[in-house]
Amino acid sequence: MAAATPRRQPTLDEVAARAGVSRSAASRVINQAPYVSRATREAVEKAIRELGYRPNRTARALATRQTGIVALALSHDDPALFADPFFAQVIVGVSAALEETDLHLLLCLASSGRGRSRLTNLLHARGVDGIMLMALHGEDPLTGIVGESGLPAVHGGRPWHAEPQWYVDSDNLGGARLATDHLLGLGRTRIVTITGQMATEVGEARYRGYREAMVMAGLVPYGTVEGDFTEAGGAAAMKVLLDRHPDLDAVFAASDKMAAGALRVLSDAGRTVPADVAVVGFDDLDIAAQTDPPLTTVHQSIQALGKEMARMLIALIAGEQPTSIILPTRLVRRGSA
Amino acid sequence: MAAATPRRQPTLDEVAARAGVSRSAASRVINQAPYVSRATREAVEKAIRELGYRPNRTARALATRQTGIVALALSHDDPALFADPFFAQVIVGVSAALEETDLHLLLCLASSGRGRSRLTNLLHARGVDGIMLMALHGEDPLTGIVGESGLPAVHGGRPWHAEPQWYVDSDNLGGARLATDHLLGLGRTRIVTITGQMATEVGEARYRGYREAMVMAGLVPYGTVEGDFTEAGGAAAMKVLLDRHPDLDAVFAASDKMAAGALRVLSDAGRTVPADVAVVGFDDLDIAAQTDPPLTTVHQSIQALGKEMARMLIALIAGEQPTSIILPTRLVRRGSA
DNA sequence: CATGTTTCTGGAAGCGCTTCCAGAGGCATG
DNA sequence: CATGCCTCTGGAAGCGCTTCCAGAAACATG
């Protein structure tokens, strides 16, 4: 047991006794409540210092009905995909926002059935004060689980075909238009697109942005193949597109990874980028700067997304009525377009 | 307030009342304690079902003095570095192990002073039952903070010049020997090494492995430059080494990223890999398979590391006395050596 | 039938904190 | 001096659960 026997921490009663006041008085000092005399405050503060007292989080949580913990739930078919830098960025952003408060972050990888039932339990057992979730697919069970709990919840991105009450999203539509407009501005007209999964909001919105920009320019989508946001998927899609539209002069890929795959295929096919074919990606991940040529892409700040999610949740927990947010995206010009 | 007012959950008292038994009896049913009659059990279970009751985590935590939460603390100068796939892998491993228990994971990015004081508070306030930490530098304040709290703690890796009581580490020494022996087996003798920071256990152990293998082969270290585990650092180190030892015929880089940087510099310098210079890396990250040529490297399973850390912590919390673990590494042969 | 053992029960006392409330003092006002 | 209003205080009642304990009920033993 030695290892598992943390030494006992002093309690509020001991502090009060040492300071010669009642427990309520001591509590008031700690919570900076009004109506505490200077003498009392100083006596209590002295006792706290001498005893090395720290209020027990659990006891406080029980009394206030606030755990001081918020959850971030990530849904993913393949847990290994969590390694995606995307999630790391979200976490960094969320942590940054939470650091300004007294809240801590509980991380739930709720991909498996077991993970989801653990989450359900956590929420219903009031183990957290609120939850942030990244649910990509509309039919993602996470949405339902979270909804039923009745806890404050903030979505990162919007699930497909469902507008949650509170969400933070990147301006995928606007970003895609930006990208396409840029290609159009370069004089390209035979612009094809490699989309993400069309059964996700992101995938669909980025396609819609491309389409709208084309239509606005008096054109029609020149060629479209659905990818899956991965490099391999992008490469495969590019092959199909080259096959179907050998005269294409530009590509808008809905993610940097797919763009990287496309670049590889284009180079193998003897096309020069950007001379023969201009390419624009989306996300502005690290890899965008490392491709050859470096990738012109649409920048979105995932850290900012995480940060805003956390802020929104904090507001919700405080009983405010925040409004959902769409974060702007911007074009980053590099060599590929 | 609407949003922040989760509906009230039923309490154990209500369950007991509905089942027509005392609260203690109901509690016994829930905790599967002995001495509960069949009739009582069924009545309580029925009431639980009808009410949709879930025991309140906080209340239970207060009574049992167990929060059911463990922390994973990551120390890092630059929070952006958290994006390193390394940490994601650790988290996946930890989560996998926790999923088999009732424990949840609290993530602490304790790089800043604020983050560290929050962590100190969390531990002393008994907000978690135990903690896992990745502290690379010996002087990392995390080690002290955690030690003072008296909570069960498990280290991932060993801080420099300090053997924590409980840790899980990769066999860095053995892996480095494996790599160097492989190069020696190829007939190379003018083997140089690019080390990680020598002020970290990892950096030092990997260098020691290289050195031991060389000495065992009757050689002395042929050339050594300290890198910093990054690609840029690896490239810079490689330049220096080429300058100092133009006739080198092999490189052992203490990380894949540094190896990638070295490959680039070697290719720029007109050396062919592996014909002129054989290169071995360490870590077996995704990039190892994507370099040109693909990198021969030492594989270590970071997921396994996370998993074992969590298991060890679970054992500690249960009052057992586990023993520290060193996880084996193995050579993965690809094109570069 | 007296006795002992085992199974089961509910009352009550916690766990360590917050918060409501009645009331004690101090002060100014009329 | 009576009255009112602030400031401050400690007692007590929670928050929702676990667990100890005394004792009731059921059963077996001599």
Image (cartoon, coloured by chain):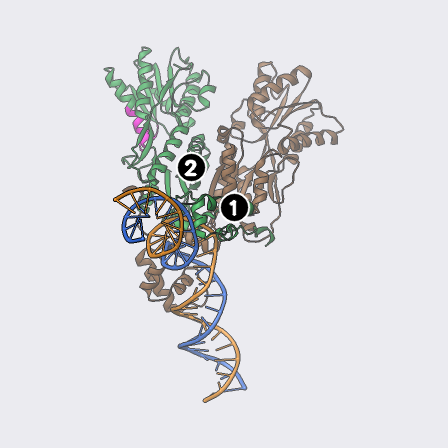
Chain colours: A green, B brown, C orange, D blue
Element class at badge 1: helix
Q: Residues within 10 Å of mark 1 (few under 14, many from 20)?
A: many
* Pointer 2 chain: A
Q: Position of residue B305 (x, y in %)?
A: 55, 40
Quarter where residue B264 is shown: top right
Residue B115 falls within the magenta-colored stretch: no
Name the one closer to the observer, B226 or A17: A17
Residues at marks 1 and 2 touching, judged by CB atoms closer than 8 Å = no
In the visual, does B293 lie left or right of A59?
Answer: right
Element class at badge 2: loop
What is the distance, in whole Å, between disc 1 and disc 2 at their CAs? Answer: 22 Å
**Residue at x 55%, y 43% (from the top left corner):** B309
What secondary structure is the stretch in magenta mostly built from? Answer: helix
Quarter where residue B30 is shown: bottom left
Which residues make up the magenta segment? A196-208
Q: Which numbered disc, 1 or 2, marks the residue closer to the eye?
A: 1
| Residue linked to disc 2 | A101
> Hey, what amino acid is under mark 1?
Ile
> Hey, what amino acid is under mark 2?
Thr
| Residue linked to disc 1 | A48
For marks 1 and 2, the one nearer the N-term is 1
